[in-house]
Image (cartoon, rainbow, N blue to C red):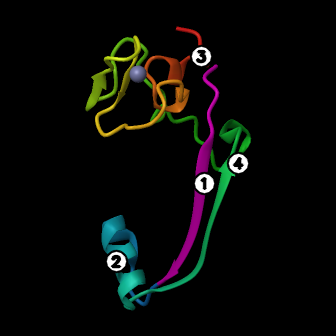
């Protein structure tokens, strides 16, 4: 199983209107601009999101091991791919494909 390290953000927003018909972006904008009230915003880093009661088993974060992520470019210094704007160390596995998704084993 892919090992994940994800941030979980819990936000509570109070409104006078029914936000179920709104886009999330609109609700967030209202909370920022003052139309809605944000009483809680909490982010925690979860090393094992699978164990969280709010985790729904999404495959959203599963990375394709056969194709580099969109926008990543082949590196001239190593055998891997990095984000296009990456200027860090080639050994930084978090910014290497395919290493980033296979725990260091290609
Ligand atoms: Zn490199």
Q: Position of residue 43 (x, y in %)?
A: 62, 62
Mark 4 or mark 1: whose residue is earlier in sequence: 1
Does residue 22 appear in this view? no
Q: Is residue 18 left or right of residue 38?
A: left
* Residue at the spot of label 1: 8
Inspect the magenta stretch and tell me whether residue 3 lies in it.
yes
Q: Which callout, 3 or 2, points at the residue further toward the start of the chain?
A: 2
Q: Which residue is mark 4?
A: 53
**Closer mark to the observer between disc 3 and disc 2:** 3
Select label 2 or label 4 by which is in front: 2
Would you place residue 31 above or below residue 5 in this image?
A: below
Q: Neighbour class for label 2 at 10 Å: few (<14), some, many (≥20)?
A: few
Q: From the Cβ of disc 4, is ligand 1 less than 8 Å away?
A: no
Q: Main secondary structure of the magenta part?
A: strand
| Local crowd size for mark 3, using a 10 Å CA cut-off: few (<14), some (14–19), many (≥20) | few
Direction top: furthest residue: 106
- Measured in 3D between alpha carbons, the distance from the residue under mark 2 to the one under mark 4, in whole angstroms, is 27 Å
In three-dimensional space, the C-alpha distance between marks 3 and 1, rounded to whole angstroms, equals: 25 Å
Q: Earlier in the sequence, mark 4 or mark 3?
A: 4
Q: Is residue 61 above or below residue 101?
A: below
The residue under label 2 is 29
Residue found 60% across the figure and 54% down from its top? 8
Q: Residues within 10 Å of mark 4 (few under 14, many from 20)?
A: few
Q: Earlier in the sequence, mark 3 or mark 1?
A: 1
Q: Which mark is residue 104?
A: 3
Question: Relative to residue 37, is residue 50 drawn left or right?
Answer: right
Tell me how far mark 2 sits from mark 1, CA to CA: 20 Å
Q: Quadrant of the N terminus?
A: top right
Q: Secondary structure at mark 2?
A: helix
Quadrant for ligand 1 reads top left
How crowded is the residue under tag 1: few (<14 C-alpha within 10 Å), some, or many (20+)? some
């Amino acid at each position: 199983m892919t090992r994940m390290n994800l941030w979980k953000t819990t936000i509570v927003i109070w409104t006078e209107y029914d936000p179920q018909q709104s886009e999330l972006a609109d609700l967030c904008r209202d909370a920022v601009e003052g139309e809605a009230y944000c009483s809680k915003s909490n982010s925690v880093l979860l090393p094992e999101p699978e164990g969280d009661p709010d985790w729904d088993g999404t495959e959203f974060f599963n990375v394709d091991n056969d194709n580099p992520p969109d926008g990543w470019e082949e590196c001239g210094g190593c055998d891997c791919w990095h984000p296009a704007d990456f200027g860090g160390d080639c050994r930084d596995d978090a910014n290497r494909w395919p290493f980033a998704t296979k725990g260091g084993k290609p």
